[in-house]
Structures are given as structure tokens and as C-alpha cells.
Image (cartoon, rainbow, N blue to C red):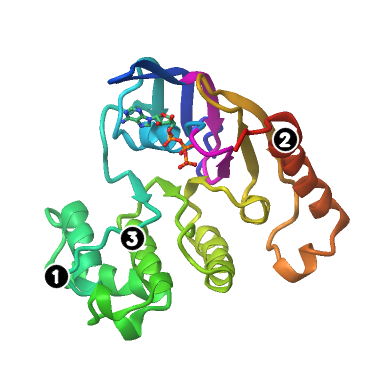
Amino acid sequence: MEKIMEKFVQIENVHMVFNTRGGRYVALDNVSLNIRQGEFVSIIGHSGCGKSTLLNLVAGLFAPTSGVLLANDREIAGPGPDRAVVFQNHSLLPWLTCFGNVYLAVERVFGDTETRADLKRRTREALALVGLTHAEQKYPHEISGGMKQRVGIARALSMQPKVLLLDEPLGALDALTRANLQDELMRLVATVGSTTLMVTHDVDEAVLLSDRIVMMTNGPAATIGEILEIDLPRPRARLELVQDAHYLRLRGEVLKFLYAREVKAA
Ligand SMILES: Nc1ncnc2c1ncn2[C@@H]1O[C@H](COP(=O)(O)OP(=O)(O)OP(=O)(O)O)[C@@H](O)[C@H]1O
């Protein structure tokens, strides 16, 4: 059996300074974090603390001002198909069907080495994974917000990324759709076993899905305040957890950090 890498994603002494019109803005100060292969890590913290910045650094969309980031022992020097991102706003191309949107990503990653039949099979499989076979030929404007996010997740998974980066993927959805997609995401991640880093504002979402929750201090110069191990057994069932004393304790720890330790002025 393949050995699980303890440091599949390495973030070492990362500082991020933005040059803004108002001067230098220190967004992140000395952030270090290792993520194990197959681990699900959430980042939580008040608005503006630098969660997306950290995720974008792992995505390779920004380069750190200092420090180093590695994925699978290779320095992250830019975006790559080994790290797929799902954003809060679906970012689907409106002139392509659901099938077309996923196919485009599949073609970019596997187009040089696989036949068109293989690429189509991969596309269909990814859409089936998120339960959207029936909507393959629909355009983004013809489907609901939850379905669009599912296409985004299918597109990300279709690339078989080593690391899945989720930037509040369910943030724009109503509570019920959100709960359904959380359950689906939990199932998908268990099936594909991807290493996942997710930004969220939702404490219950973080506890339900994560192996660890990284809690960030407020900016400027935000850093990791605490890391909470979520040692709830899997598979996890939402309805059972809401009555589980340990779940409630863990949830309380995150709330305490956010609303007692890192109080944010409105
Ligand atoms: N490209 C940029 N140029 C200048 N400043 C930036 C840039 N990107 C982010 N920032 C600043 O860095 C800080 C962190 O932003 P970031 O978007 O990472 O926060 P966040 O925790 O994800 O916020 P939210 O929860 O509201 O999405 C903010 O003060 C933001 O204004």
C-alpha cells in the first residue's frame, strides 16, 4: 500500500504583503501549516482575516512575499491541475452546457494523452458523481444555484486533483441546499480521498466536514491562532451529531475562539 504523506501540503513561514493605494498591507504574518494526504482541513476566521489569501497561495494564484509553499514535495510556483479550486460563485462558462464546462477541464488535463471517448467518459463520470447526469445538456442559466455549484465541484474532481481547494463553495446557497451539498461533499471526499482545504464562515460546516479546523486571528498581520482536531468518527451523520456531546463541545471551542478570543468589531 502507498504510504500516506504526512506533509502533502506544506506552508512554511508564509508572509503576504499587498501593495495597496493606501500603502503596504500585511495580510498574513508567519503562517505555517502541514496538511496530511487525504486530510480535510477547514480555515475559519472573521471576514478579511486572510482565509482566501491563504487558499489562493496554495492554488498558486499569488506568490508569497516570503516563505514557501509545497504540494507533494514540489514548490508551488503557479496554478496547476494538481490543485483544483471551487469558488463561491460557480464561475461556469455560460455558453457551454454542464457537459461542456466539465469537458473543457478534462480536455485541458488529459487531452494530450487520451482519446475523445475517454475524455467524454471522464466527463460523464464526474457529472454522475454529483448526481447531475440528467442535466448534462443544460446550460448554467437553466439550473439552480446548488446545481451550478455541483457542476463546479464535478469540474474540479474531473481533473483528479491531488489537492481540492474550496473557497466557501456553499456560501451563496440557502440553508437546506447547503446542508444537502455538505453531505454530498462529505461523501465525495470520502470516495475520491482527495486532500482538501476549505475556507468557510460556517462553524457547523467546518466541524461536520473537517479532520482539523484552522482558526485564524483577525487581520492585519493575521496568523493561525489555534488548530482544533475534529476526532469525530466517520462516516458522520448530521442528525446524530446535533445531539452528540463531543460534537457540541468541539463546536463550542470554535465559537469561543471566534466570539470570545478573536472578537471582531462590526
Ligand atoms: N489583491 C489584493 N490587493 C490588496 N489587498 C488585498 C488583496 N487581496 C486581499 N487583500 C486584503 O487582504 C486581507 C485579507 O483578504 P482575504 O480575502 O484573504 O480575507 P478573507 O478572510 O478571505 O475574507 P472574507 O471572509 O471576507 O472572504 C483583506 O484586508 C483584503 O482587503
Q: Is residue 1 visible?
A: no
Q: CA distance from mark 2 to mark 1?
A: 44 Å
Q: Which numbered tag is attached to residue 257?
A: 2
Main SS of residues in magenta: strand
Closer to us: 221 or 103: 221
* Residue 257, image quadrant: top right
* Farthest front residue in view: 266
Q: Which amino acid, by three-letter code, is at mark 2? A: Phe
Q: x and y percent of residue 93 in the render?
A: 19, 63
- Residue 179 as seen in the image, left or right of residue 78: right
- Is 41 within the magenta? yes
Q: CA distance from mark 3 to mark 2?
A: 30 Å
Q: Which amino acid, by three-letter code, is at mark 3? A: His
- Is 204 within the magenta? no
Q: Residues within 10 Å of mark 1 (few under 14, many from 20)?
A: few
Residue range in magenta is 28-48
Q: Residues within 10 Å of mark 2 (few under 14, many from 20)?
A: some
Q: x and y percent of residue 184 in the render?
A: 53, 68
Q: Is residue 168 visible?
A: yes
- Residue 101 as seen in the image, left or right of residue 159: left
Q: Residue at x 68, y 63 (%)?
A: 235
- For label 1, the SS is loop
Q: Residue at x 11, y 53 (%)?
A: 112
- Residue 119 as seen in the image, left or right of residue 53: left
Q: Label 3 belongs to which residue?
A: 90
Q: Which amino acid, by three-letter code, is at mark 1? A: Trp
